């Protein structure tokens, strides 16, 4: 075999394709015989040309697994010896590396079985050889062996550490240091316990020293390896960074600031800072690194880029990502330095710095939203000034920033529409298409939430946009359509005069079939759905068929974005038609299912830099060892179009089910299968829509008439499936928004289905809720390196608000029986009420306790002494939401808390008093204070000085904003009147005047008006003559409204 094989190996390396193909076929046939192994080893050691020796090693690596167990012991021994010789005696580096790869494969089988005890001693000896080649190949083997027998190195870790540290400082040249760096990186995953972690941290200074030397020598490829190691250290579950975070950040900042380095090297440095900001933000705060990072990143925003192919690697773009990530994770530390940078840079003569000023403020608006809201005047002054800048780049950045503000600073930004909208309108006429495009984006984001405030601007806006829509290039038409959609959403029925023109224009766009026009077609399809929502079913239903037909025909064009927007269009149409949408279900549901079942289309970027198989086409020969043959995956990216399409289709399933209810029955089984699958999808956007849609599917099943015998069973089975998914999501999903949605869905299920439906899951639900309150669930896991301060833990306000919805929902469904469960949840909940917690945490606790007290009733008395001090403290909060919730909570505690509340009455009245005065700016706070006093009067009137309380109480009536308190407040006043309480009789004219305003108010509920009408009827029956003059003094509208409700009572 040896002789024939040698000829075939030579033939395989020939440039003639036919000859190569014949050789390959022959080699495949010979390779089925175990004797191919000693033959290949022979050629590895004796072939004259390096290429043949390398090919022999590659084929060995591919075939050794299948044949190793069949080889006699003496042959195995000779194979191992020959490979060791090849590593130590071979002159060709590629052949040495290929031989090392074979050793790694054999070691996988031989070392665990004790068949190769001399391998590790040989490697240690080889790594200390005087020859650079030997040291390099030993390190390469250490790296390679971690992939197969990494655990066997753990007893030798201290020895290895010493060796690797020495090799990192090798003076002979670059090759050994590079191999040592790679070896260090390959051992990261095996570092677990405390002693090893501490030891491993000793590598970091050496890695940094080597990296700095390499930068000085122009060896940037070595620095890239160091950054890959830092990347793995950050992602490692073991706390491998420790205090080295500081030195890694300093080095990374040096690199990304160095304009002489390659763009890719600088980008890697920025990326390390970005990962640290995302995963180790507490460490950045602990080591006071936030300001040093921003001092480098903010000026990088002003760095000039030459465009070109490496746009994604540009320093300004990468710096913006870091600042954005830091703002999301460390808003308090980021806002002030960035605002200071923006305030100074906006005055810089260099337009790049003025551009950076606006960009920086736009970039931090998502993370620092609450802080920007407090300084909105200052921030807007900078950005609106930039929008008038003579330089296009500055105006473009300002338009971008305004769009970000409109998206993230709701609702406060809307109150500035008087200054913002005229500036955006002016920017729509900019000479630059780029500024126009960003201005349309800003307009779209700004108008969406304006509501009726947009009405005065409707004519000039639509005139401008309709003209632009018909006279602009495609990209501007698309952003223009987005702006029209936002205006339609805000204006609702007021959009009717423009609807016909817009819809006629969209018909043109919705029949485009050229690839370059399909984005415009997608936007047009979306816009028709938005206009339909604005003008409603009556106007839209008769003209819908051609739009539906055009939307369905778009699926034949194989364009993911068009399918995504079309699912959104169908969802909107289902919402306005309700059961009328059922006629379209047979046509659109299969399309939705098809999108949900699409292949994800993962695109894998493979690092093949060390893959011998790429040499001379060696990769054509199949391998027996699939695990080793698998190339290293450096990066996985998903075609986001498919992902967005799946999310839109998943959302559509839920909305179809919600709006057509029982008529959706034929599609429920398949829908449930898809949603169950998508609830565990890898991307949070799809999981989020699945979690929402599962609740809608339950609603549809519940609506099926009970005449169908299988309905109760199907509902029970589906509820079981959905509840288990939701509870698993609460503890195991790593995305806070998805978990929040699961909590809200469970709260809705409790309300809609009642306690008996969820009773089997209550104990498990309480445990899942406890995990979230203790911040132990997967989505709340903190970084392992940081020293977490329990009182300063950052968390998602939306998440905890959703968690807190569960307690009132259970209390409402269980009443007083909720107390044993509440006892478990109470202390974990109260952690969020500590003084050191942010205001939104404390008010979440107070609001939750208020609703629990309201629904649980008298058992709340056992908690009064722990809850009342918190609520009293929050009455003096600087935040109006906190004061409002505190007043409501105190009222409910007084109503249901019984005797334990009495000792607090004096403190309560003193705490509530300022809320009735002119110094209280918020009407809703005052209304809730009135509600609290009303509950106290109704529960324990004898403990209140009514002669002092009533004048203050009545002075703030009628209620102005929180009409949820109306029945409580007016019922209290009516009871005092009907019981002829002597303290109220002196205020009858004021009371009748209040009642007149209530009766005439279009916002008040009929039952409230009926109640005050009864009270006035009682007063007339008791004090007829005097009452007549009081009634005559009322405004006619109030008197007539009262009279109408007196006659009904």
Image: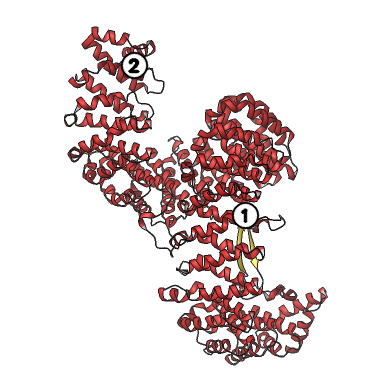
The image quadrant where one finds the N terminus is: bottom right
Horizontal placement of 328 versus 21: left or right? Answer: left
In this view, the mark in front (2 or 1): 1
Residue 441, given in percent of the width and then of the height, sits at 62, 40
Count the marks: 2
Residue 784, given in percent of the width and then of the height, sits at 43, 64
Horizontal placement of 1019 versus 158: left or right? Answer: left
Residue 78 found in image quarter: bottom right
Residue that appears at 63% across and 73% down: 216
Mark 1 highlights which residue?
317
Whether residue 187 appears in this view of the structure is no
Secondary element under disc 1, as helix, strand or loop, is helix
| Mark-to-mark CA distance, 2 and 1 | 62 Å
Between 1029 and 390, the residue placed more toward the observer is 390
Please tell me whether residue 411 is drawn above or below residue 18 in the rendered image. above
Secondary element under disc 2, as helix, strand or loop, is helix
Residue 33, given in percent of the width and then of the height, sits at 67, 83
Residue that appears at 61% across and 81% down: 176
Mark 2 highlights which residue?
996
The image quadrant where one finds the C terminus is: top left
Residue 921, given in percent of the width and then of the height, sits at 38, 32
């Amino acid at each position: 075999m040896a002789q024939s094989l040698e000829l075939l190996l030579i033939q395989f390396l020939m440039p003639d394709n036919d000859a190569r193909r014949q050789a390959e076929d022959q080699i495949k046939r010979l390779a089925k015989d175990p004797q191919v192994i000693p033959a290949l080893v022979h050629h590895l050691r004796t072939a004259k040309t390096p290429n043949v020796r390398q090919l022999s090693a590659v084929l060995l690596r591919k075939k050794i697994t299948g044949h190793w167990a069949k080889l006699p012991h003496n042959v195995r021994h000779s194979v191992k010896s020959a490979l060791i010789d090849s590593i130590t005696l071979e002159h060709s580096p590629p052949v040495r590396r290929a031989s090392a790869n074979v050793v790694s494969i054999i070691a996988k089988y031989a070392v665990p079985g004790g068949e190769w005890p001399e391998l590790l001693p040989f490697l240690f000896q080889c790594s200390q050889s005087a020859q650079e080649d030997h040291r390099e190949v030993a390190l390469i083997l250490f790296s390679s062996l971690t992939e197969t027998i990494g655990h066997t190195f753990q007893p030798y870790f201290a020895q290895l550490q010493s060796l690797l540290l020495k090799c990192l400082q090798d003076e002979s040249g670059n090759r050994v240091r590079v191999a040592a760096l790679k070896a260090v990186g390959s051992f990261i995953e095996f570092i677990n316990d405390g002693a090893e972690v501490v030891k491993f941290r000793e590598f970091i200074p050496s890695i940094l020293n080597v990296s700095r030397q390499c930068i000085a020598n122009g060896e940037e490829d070595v620095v890239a390896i160091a950054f890959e190691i830092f990347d793995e250290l950050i992602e490692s579950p073991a706390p491998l960074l420790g205090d080295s975070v500081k030195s890694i950040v300093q080095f990374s900042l040096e690199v990304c600031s160095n304009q002489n380095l390659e763009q890719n090297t600088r980008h890697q440095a920025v990326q390390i800072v970005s990962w640290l900001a995302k995963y180790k933000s507490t460490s950045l705060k602990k080591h006071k690194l936030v300001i040093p990072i921003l001092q480098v990143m903010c000026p990088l925003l002003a760095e000039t880029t030459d465009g070109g192919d490496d746009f994604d690697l540009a320093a300004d773009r990468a710096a913006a990502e870091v600042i954005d990530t830091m703002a999301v994770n460390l808003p308090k530390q980021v806002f002030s330095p960035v605002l200071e940078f923006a305030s100074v840079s906006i005055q810089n003569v260099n337009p790049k710095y003025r551009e950076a000023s606006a960009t920086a403020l736009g970039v931090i608006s998502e993370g620092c939203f609450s802080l920007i809201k407090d300084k909105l005047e200052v921030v807007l002054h900078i950005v609106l000034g930039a929008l008038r800048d003579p330089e296009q780049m500055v105006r473009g950045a300002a338009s971008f920033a305004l769009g970000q503000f409109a998206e993230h600073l709701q609702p406060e930004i809307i109150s500035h529409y008087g200054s913002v909208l005229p500036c955006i309108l002016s920017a729509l006429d900019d000479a630059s298409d780029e500024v126009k495009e960003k201005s349309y984006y800003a307009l779209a984001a700004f108008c969406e939430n304006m509501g009726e405030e947009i009405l005065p601007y409707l004519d000039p806006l639509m005139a401008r946009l309709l003209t632009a829509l018909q006279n602009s290039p495609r990209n501007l038409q698309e952003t223009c359509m987005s702006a029209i959609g936002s205006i339609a959403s805000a204006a609702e029925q007021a959009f009717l005069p423009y609807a016909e023109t817009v819809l006629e224009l969209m018909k043109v766009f919705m029949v485009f079939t050229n690839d370059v026009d399909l984005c415009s077609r997608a936007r047009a399809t979306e816009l028709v759905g938005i206009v339909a929502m604005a003008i409603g079913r009556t106007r839209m239903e008769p003209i819908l068929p051609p739009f539906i037909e055009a939307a369905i025909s778009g699926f034949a064009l194989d364009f993911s974005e068009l399918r995504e927007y079309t699912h959104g269009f169908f969802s909107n149409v289902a919402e306005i038609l309700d059961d009328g949408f059922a006629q379209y279900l047979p046509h659109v549901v299969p399309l939705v299912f098809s999108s949900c079942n699409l292949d994800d289309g993962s695109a894998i970027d493979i690092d093949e830099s060390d893959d011998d198989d790429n040499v001379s086409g060696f990769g054509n020969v199949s391998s027996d060892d699939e695990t080793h043959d698998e190339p290293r995956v450096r990066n996985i990216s998903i075609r986001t179009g498919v992902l967005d399409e799946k999310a839109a289709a998943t959302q559509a399933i839920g909305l179809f089910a919600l709006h057509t209810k029982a008529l959706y029955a034929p599609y429920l089984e398949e829908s449930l299968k898809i949603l169950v699958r998508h609830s565990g999808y890898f991307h949070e956007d799809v999981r989020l829509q699945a979690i929402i849609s599962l609740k809608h599917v339950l609603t549809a099943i519940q609506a099926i008439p009970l005449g169908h015998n299988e309905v109760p069973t199907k509902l029970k089975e589906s509820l079981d499936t959905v509840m288990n998914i939701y509870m698993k999501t609460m503890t195991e999903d790593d995305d806070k928004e998805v978990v929040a949605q699961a909590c809200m869905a469970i709260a809705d299920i409790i309300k809609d289905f009642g306690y008996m439906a969820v009773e089997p899951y209550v104990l498990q639900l309480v445990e899942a809720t406890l995990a979230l309150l203790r911040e132990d669930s997967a989505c709340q896991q903190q970084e392992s390196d940081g020293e977490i301060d329990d009182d300063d833990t950052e968390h998602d306000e939306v998440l905890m608000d959703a968690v807190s919805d569960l307690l009132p929902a259970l209390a409402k469904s269980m009443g007083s029986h909720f107390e044993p469960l509440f006892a478990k949840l109470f202390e974990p909940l109260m952690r969020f009420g500590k003084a050191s917690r942010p205001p939104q945490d404390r008010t979440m606790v107070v609001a939750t306790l208020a609703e629990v007290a309201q629904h649980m009733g008298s058992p709340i008395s056992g908690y009064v002494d722990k809850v009342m001090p918190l609520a009293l403290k929050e009455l003096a909060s600087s935040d109006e939401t906190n004061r409002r919730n505190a007043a409501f909570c105190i009222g409910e505690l007084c109503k249901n808390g019984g005797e334990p509340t009495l000792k607090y009455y004096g403190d309560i009245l003193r705490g509530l008093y300022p809320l009735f005065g002119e110094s209280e700016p918020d009407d809703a706070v005052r209304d809730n204070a009135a509600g609290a006093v009303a509950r106290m009067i109704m529960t324990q009137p004898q403990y209140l000085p009514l002669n002092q309380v009533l004048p203050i109480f009545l002075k703030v009536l009628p209620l102005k904003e929180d009409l949820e308190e109306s029945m409580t407040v007016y019922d209290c006043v009516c009871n005092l009147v009907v019981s002829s309480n002597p303290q109220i009789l002196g205020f009858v004219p004021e009371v009748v005047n209040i009642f007149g305003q209530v009766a005439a108010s279009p916002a008040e509920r009929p039952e409230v008006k009926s109640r005050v009408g009864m009270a006035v009827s009682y007063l007339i029956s008791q004090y007829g003559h005097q009452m007549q003059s009081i009634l005559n003094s009322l405004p006619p509208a109030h008197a007539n409204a009262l009279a109408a409700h007196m006659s009904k009572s």
